Amino acid sequence: MSTSISIASAASVQKQFYNVIMQDGADPWMYKHTDGFYYFTKTTGNNVTIWKSSTLTGIDAAEKREITTGGQNVWAPEIHFLNGAWYIYYAKDDGDNANHRMYVMQNTSSNPMQGTWVDKGQITDTTNRWAIDGTPLSVNGQLYFIWSGWEGSENVRQNLYIAHMSNPWTIDSARVEIARPTHTWETNHQPNVNEGPQVVIKNNKINLIYSASGSWTNDYALGLITAQTNSNLLSPSAWSKRTQPVFASANGVYGPGHASFTTSPDGKEDWIVYHSAKFNNAGWNREIRTQKFSWNTDNTPQFGQPLNPNVQIAIPSGEPDRTRYEGEQGTFGGAAYASSSPNGSGLSKAGHIDTDGSYVQYTVNIPTTGTYMLAARTGNGTDGLDWSTLRLSVDSGNPTDFFITNKGWENWGLSTQRLSLTAGNHTIRFSKGNGYGELDFFDLVPIK
């Protein structure tokens, strides 16, 4: 039986999407578990937040759980399933960056959205130096930990280190430096950094993808270090670094970095999930993107370039079709009206929802009662306001805030809402909120 929403008037079935999957965030970690669900984390402040989604592109509207850490400046958490239990690795400090260290927590429940997360404490080698971006690596029945750290107690540069683990929360060897910033593209900003290590293995090739250059600049990019699975991974000579980045700014996407890797729902495709600046020179104001990648004959990944954000790409294989409602095809009220849009999907958009009483609304048909993601391509260039809202209502229900990040007009982003809808026709209305927002279109996608 098809999971697609039946076509209503002014709607079309789509197998494509525009490449933003979360309109705000950095340091994305996406893991597809054996239960078929995606588990996602990113940097969220002082806690760790987990999202659980049946689709790769639906993570923004997914179920989520927040976990306290007792620290500050929690960076780049990752969730892993190791030796029959769940583990979250994360960096935190006490408010002073010099005190950033890596920590780990454990959950023995089969579902990480349930059960108790137990603090297993700090994970460190004997030097106990500054450490962030830790990730475990399992090879040939052995566990290793890879992270970005300082050589000494001062922020001179960030190197990549590896150590052996006796269990998922304990390092039992000396740390070994496997990379430091040396190439021109890695050393063009101060301090020099190698960070965000992530591993993807193809056949006998370990591909360690890392981030370098200034994370706050357009020059931030991904590099590649390789090793063989049968080599001594605690020997620096086992690791070979490419001289040039393998994924860098292009096609209107700036500063791509801190990637993770997953597969499509049916397992047939490989996808990179990464953050980028929301606009040119946006610094640490970032969003989450994804795209498919392929493999070279030497078992290294071929990422190509970041795809043009104004060109649609195919949804991951195995995801349900989307039913799309173009913004300009709604019914307008008050001051709102449709206007041209050079980057819009139909070269038009719904806008000018600028006064009280202004709105645009749509009649949608839902064939089956259930939960749906409303995923809207939205724009916000409101002066002096980081976030705008439209007010979203379904039928005669109370309106809720529909948040739109500020990227500038015609630089489209993504806003989502999780909706419980009964079978039949419904009226979805976007009305005036705080600041100003525009709507290119919205998709409705069923959620498991």
Image (cartoon, rainbow, N blue to C red):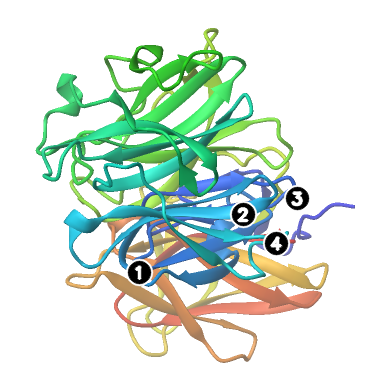
* C-alpha span from label 2 to label 3: 13 Å
Q: First in sequence, mark 3 or 1: give its number.
A: 3
Q: Kindly identify which numbered label has been placed on residue 46.
A: 1
* Mark in front: 2 vs 4: 2
The kind of residue tagged 1 is Asn
Mark 3 and mark 4 in contact (Cβ < 8 Å)? no
The residue at which mark 3 appears reads as: 35
Q: Is residue 292 above or below residue 405?
A: above
Disc marking residue 86: 2
Q: Secondary structure at mark 2?
A: strand
Which structural element holds mark 3? loop
The nearer-to-camera label among 4 and 3 is 4
Residue 39, picture quadrant: bottom right
Q: Sequence order check: which comes first, mark 1 or mark 4?
A: 1
Reply above or below: 110 against 165.
Answer: below
Circle 4 is placed at which residue position? 111
